[in-house]
């Protein structure tokens, strides 16, 4: 039996309700209290780059995976819209 993180359940639930993934990602960013600068450091990118990934404007798979891991949500769920449009 697969155990889902609370963040994954939140993203999936809000997505099913029709909320756009970029808005869900931005909201989750604030809710989990991980500073954007910390995400940038862990992902090895600039803070402004994190913002662009969260907004769906950047698509480098390795960074998408790293950012999704930081938020404990599978990349296929967290960035479904970005992956779908690649």
Image (tube, rainbow, N blue to C red):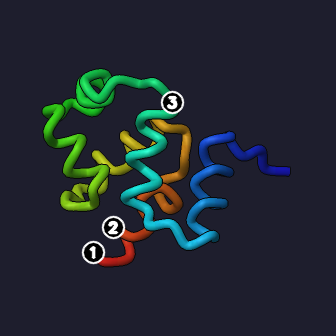
- Which of pointers 1 and 3 indicates the residue nearer the eye? 3
Q: Are marks 2 and 3 in contact (CB under 8 Å)?
A: no
Counting residues from the start of the chain, the first of labels 2 and 3 encountered is: 3
Counting residues from the start of the chain, the first of labels 1 and 3 encountered is: 3
Residue at mark 1: 86
Which residue is pictured at 39% across the width and 70% down the height? Answer: 81
Report which quarter residue 36 is drawn in: top left
Numbered mark located on residue 32 in the image: 3
Residue at mark 2: 82
- What is the CA distance from the residue labelled 2 to the residue labelled 1? 6 Å
Q: Is residue 73 left or right of residue 1?
A: left
Q: Point out residue 72 in the picture as x, y percentages from the top left corner.
A: 55, 39
Q: Is residue 13 left or right of residue 57?
A: right
- What is the CA distance from the residue labelled 2 to the residue labelled 3? 22 Å
Q: Are marks 2 and 1 in contact (CB under 8 Å)?
A: yes
Which residue is pictured at 67% across the width and 41% down the height? Answer: 5
Q: Point out residue 2 in the picture as x, y percentages from the top left corner.
A: 78, 50
* Secondary element type, mark 1: loop
Instruction: Give the crowd class for mark 2: few <14, some 14-19, many >=20 residues within 10 Å.
Output: many
């Amino acid at each position: 039996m697969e155990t889902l993180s609370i963040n994954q359940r939140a993203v999936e639930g809000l997505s099913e309700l029709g909320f756009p993934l970029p808005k869900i990602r931005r909201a989750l960013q604030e809710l989990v209290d991980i500073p954007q600068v910390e995400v940038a450091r862990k992902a090895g990118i600039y803070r402004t780059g994190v913002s662009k990934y969260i907004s769906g404007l950047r698509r480098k798979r390795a960074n998408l995976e790293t950012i999704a891991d930081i938020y404990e949500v599978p990349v296929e769920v967290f960035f479904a819209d970005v992956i779908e449009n690649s």
